Protein backbone atom coordinates (compact mmCIF):
# COMPACT_ATOMS: atom_id res chain seq x y z
CA UNK A 1 0.00 0.00 0.00
CA UNK A 2 1.44 3.40 -0.95
CA UNK A 3 1.76 6.13 1.62
CA UNK A 4 -0.58 8.29 -0.44
CA UNK A 5 -3.39 5.82 0.14
CA UNK A 6 -2.59 5.22 3.79
CA UNK A 7 -2.76 8.92 4.81
CA UNK A 8 -6.14 10.65 4.52
CA UNK A 9 -6.10 13.61 2.14
CA UNK A 10 -7.05 16.11 4.87
CA UNK A 11 -4.20 14.95 7.08
CA UNK A 12 -1.75 15.09 4.19
CA UNK A 13 -2.80 18.68 3.45
CA UNK A 14 -2.43 19.64 7.11
CA UNK A 15 1.05 18.12 7.19
CA UNK A 16 2.02 20.01 4.03
CA UNK A 17 0.65 23.29 5.38
CA UNK A 18 2.44 22.68 8.67
CA UNK A 19 5.70 22.05 6.85
CA UNK A 20 5.33 25.25 4.80
CA UNK A 21 4.47 27.23 7.94
CA UNK A 22 7.52 25.81 9.73
CA UNK A 23 9.76 26.82 6.81
CA UNK A 24 8.25 30.32 6.90
CA UNK A 25 8.82 30.53 10.66
CA UNK A 26 12.46 29.50 10.23
CA UNK A 27 12.88 32.16 7.56
CA UNK A 28 11.40 34.83 9.79
CA UNK A 29 13.41 33.64 12.81
CA UNK A 30 16.74 34.57 11.22
CA UNK A 31 15.33 37.93 10.13
CA UNK A 32 14.01 38.64 13.62
CA UNK A 33 17.42 37.77 15.03
CA UNK A 34 19.09 40.14 12.58
CA UNK A 35 16.61 42.91 13.47
CA UNK A 36 17.42 42.47 17.15
CA UNK A 37 21.16 42.59 16.48
CA UNK A 38 20.78 45.72 14.35
CA UNK A 39 18.60 47.37 17.01
CA UNK A 40 21.38 46.65 19.50
CA UNK A 41 23.91 48.17 17.07
CA UNK A 42 25.69 44.84 16.71
CA UNK A 43 26.27 45.18 13.00
CA UNK A 44 29.18 42.73 12.81
CA UNK A 45 27.09 40.01 14.46
CA UNK A 46 24.11 40.86 12.23
CA UNK A 47 26.31 40.59 9.13
CA UNK A 48 27.62 37.23 10.32
CA UNK A 49 24.05 36.00 10.82
CA UNK A 50 23.07 37.11 7.31
CA UNK A 51 26.17 35.49 5.85
CA UNK A 52 25.23 32.22 7.57
CA UNK A 53 21.74 32.46 6.05
CA UNK A 54 23.27 33.01 2.61
CA UNK A 55 25.49 29.95 3.04
CA UNK A 56 22.33 27.89 3.61
CA UNK A 57 20.28 29.66 0.94
CA UNK A 58 22.50 31.51 -1.57
CA UNK A 59 19.51 32.66 -3.63
CA UNK A 60 17.68 34.19 -0.64
CA UNK A 61 16.89 37.70 -1.86
CA UNK A 62 15.78 38.86 1.60
CA UNK A 63 19.20 37.91 2.93
CA UNK A 64 20.93 39.76 0.08
CA UNK A 65 18.81 42.81 0.87
CA UNK A 66 19.72 42.62 4.55
CA UNK A 67 23.37 42.16 3.68
CA UNK A 68 23.21 45.28 1.51
CA UNK A 69 21.62 47.31 4.31
CA UNK A 70 24.13 46.23 6.91
CA UNK A 71 27.09 46.84 4.60
CA UNK A 72 25.71 50.31 3.80
CA UNK A 73 25.36 51.13 7.51
CA UNK A 74 28.95 50.01 8.01
CA UNK A 75 30.10 52.37 5.23
CA UNK A 76 31.02 49.53 2.88
CA UNK A 77 29.11 51.13 0.02
CA UNK A 78 30.57 49.33 -3.03
CA UNK A 79 29.73 45.97 -1.44
CA UNK A 80 26.25 47.20 -0.49
CA UNK A 81 25.73 48.37 -4.07
CA UNK A 82 26.64 44.90 -5.33
CA UNK A 83 24.14 43.22 -2.99
CA UNK A 84 21.36 45.60 -4.02
CA UNK A 85 22.07 44.98 -7.69
CA UNK A 86 21.93 41.23 -7.03
CA UNK A 87 18.38 41.65 -5.73
CA UNK A 88 17.36 43.99 -8.55
CA UNK A 89 18.43 41.48 -11.19
CA UNK A 90 15.64 39.21 -9.93
CA UNK A 91 13.15 41.82 -8.68
CA UNK A 92 13.78 45.02 -10.65
CA UNK A 93 10.79 46.87 -9.23
CA UNK A 94 11.63 46.41 -5.52
CA UNK A 95 11.12 50.00 -4.38
CA UNK A 96 12.91 49.55 -1.04
CA UNK A 97 16.01 48.15 -2.72
CA UNK A 98 15.89 50.82 -5.45
CA UNK A 99 15.75 53.54 -2.77
CA UNK A 100 18.57 51.91 -0.81
CA UNK A 101 20.69 51.68 -3.96
CA UNK A 102 20.00 55.34 -4.74
CA UNK A 103 21.21 56.24 -1.22
CA UNK A 104 24.40 54.21 -1.60
CA UNK A 105 25.11 55.74 -4.99
CA UNK A 106 24.58 59.23 -3.59
CA UNK A 107 26.83 58.52 -0.61
CA UNK A 108 29.55 57.34 -2.98
CA UNK A 109 29.17 60.52 -5.02
CA UNK A 110 28.43 58.41 -8.09
CA UNK A 111 26.83 60.16 -11.03
CA UNK A 112 24.70 57.07 -11.59
CA UNK A 113 21.06 57.31 -10.70
CA UNK A 114 18.48 54.64 -10.16
CA UNK A 115 15.48 54.80 -12.45
CA UNK A 116 12.62 54.49 -9.98
CA UNK A 117 9.68 52.83 -11.64
CA UNK A 118 11.81 51.44 -14.44
CA UNK A 119 12.17 47.75 -15.09
CA UNK A 120 15.92 47.98 -14.50
CA UNK A 121 18.42 50.07 -12.69
CA UNK A 122 20.51 52.38 -14.81
CA UNK A 123 24.24 51.95 -14.63
Image (tube, rainbow, N blue to C red):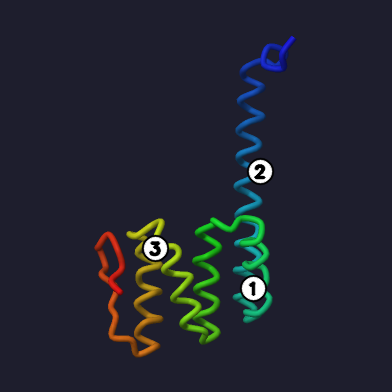
Relative to 11, residue 71 above or below: below
Mark 1 — residue? 46
The location of residue 118, given as percent across then percent down, is 25, 63
Q: What element carries label 2?
A: helix
Of labels 1 and 3, the one closer to you: 3
Label 2 near label 1: C-beta < 8 Å? no
Point 52% across, 65% down: residue? 64
Label 3 near label 1: C-beta < 8 Å? no
Mark 3 — residue? 88
- From the viewer's side, name the closer residue of 95 and 112: 112
Which residue is farthest top? Answer: 1
Q: Quadrant of residue 117?
A: bottom left
Point 55% across, 76% down: residue? 70
**Left or right placement of residue 98 versus residue 34 in this view:** left
- From the viewer's side, name the closer residue of 58 and 11: 58
Label located before the other in sequence (3 or 2): 2
Mark 2 — residue? 22
| Rendered-image quadrant of the N terminus | top right
Q: What element carries label 3?
A: helix
The location of residue 53, given as percent across then percent down, is 64, 61
Q: In which quarter of the image is residue 36?
A: bottom right
Label 2 near label 3: C-beta < 8 Å? no
Disc 3: CA contacts within 10 A as few (<14), some (14-19) or many (>=20)? many
Amino acid sequence: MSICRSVPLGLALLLLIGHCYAEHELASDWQQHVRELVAGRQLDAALLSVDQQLKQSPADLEAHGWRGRILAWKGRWPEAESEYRTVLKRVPSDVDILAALADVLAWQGTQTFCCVGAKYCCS
